[in-house]
Image (cartoon, grey):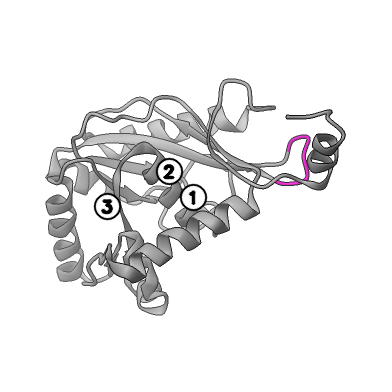
Amino acid sequence: MIRAAKGGPFGWAVDRYIGWKVRSTFRGLWVRGELPSDGVGRLVYLNHSNWWDGFVLHQLCQVAGWDGYCLMDEENLRRYPFHTKMGAFSIRKQDAMSSLSSLRYAKELLRKPNAAVCVFPEGEHRPFGVHPLQLERGVELLARAAKAECVPIAIRYAFFEHERPDVLLEVGAPHEAGPLARFQSGLESVVRRVSEATGLEGFTRKVAGARGVAERWDRARGLGP
């Protein structure tokens, strides 16, 4: 198993690079719902529709004040080891002993103050908004083993009236560990809610990104913020 390796000069550089990359690509990162901030460890589970999800999750943990970690397929983590500096640790799903080691490590992380162990229970990229979601049992097993608070969050990448896309994050109500159906209903609920958004009303911008040409032109003419 590959453990997370946050911190150090390289970790600092990775943090700055990811922040720059997200800000330069998207118009903003917007959140609707309450991000828990009571200092306890929690299990965060999200849909997985895009290459950007890991970078967005990294930024979300920073603005929420969470010490973020993320479960990642070991083959991909060996291919992109810099993800350990973002808090990624590995699992080999077809290897029972490896999965058990990853589960124990995740339980250790969840004992840390402000820790957020994040998982994408679909296990692979799937098109946004396709229901029913197909979740794997790992999220249920980890939640039961760690007795952790669980928080569903949906990610959507949306173009509205601007050149650049916005990242929308819908945060659901925290809940206790339970059967897999509880996680499926929780995640499907927030995915449906965020998919129905036709604008940014009700969302709070947590990360300001880049302006498009039209916005910069309007600002130069005194027509925009």
Marks 1/2: CA distance? 6 Å
At horizontal 57% and vertical 20% (from top left) the residue drawn is 202
Q: Is residue 32 visible?
A: yes
Element on which disc 1 rests: helix
Q: Secondary structure at mark 2?
A: helix
Most distant residue in the bottom direction: 79
Q: Quadrant of residue 80?
A: bottom left
Q: Is residue 50 above or below residue 153?
A: below
Residue drawn at 36 percent across, 63 percent down = 12
Q: In front: 186, or 179?
A: 186
In the image, residue 30 above or below residue 71:
above
Give residue 138's mark: 3
Residue 158 lies, in percent from the top left, at 67, 41
- Quadrant containing the N terminus is bottom left
Across and down, in percent, residue 183 comes to: 34, 37
* Disc 1: CA contacts within 10 A as few (<14), some (14-19) or many (>=20): some
In the rendered view, does 225 fall on the left or right side of 183?
right
Please give the count of numbered marks on the rendered protein: 3
* Type of secondary structure dominating the magenta stretch: loop
Question: Would you name the residue on which mark 2 appears?
Answer: 60
| Residue at 42% across, 37% down | 153
Q: Are marks 1 and 2 in contact (CB under 8 Å)?
A: yes
Which numbered disc, 3 or 1, marks the residue that appears first in the sequence? 1
Mark 3 → mark 1, Cα distance in angstroms: 22 Å
- Specify the segment rendered in magenta: 160-164
Report if residue 167 is visible in the image. no
Q: Which residue is mark 1?
A: 56
Q: Amino acid at mark 3?
A: Gly
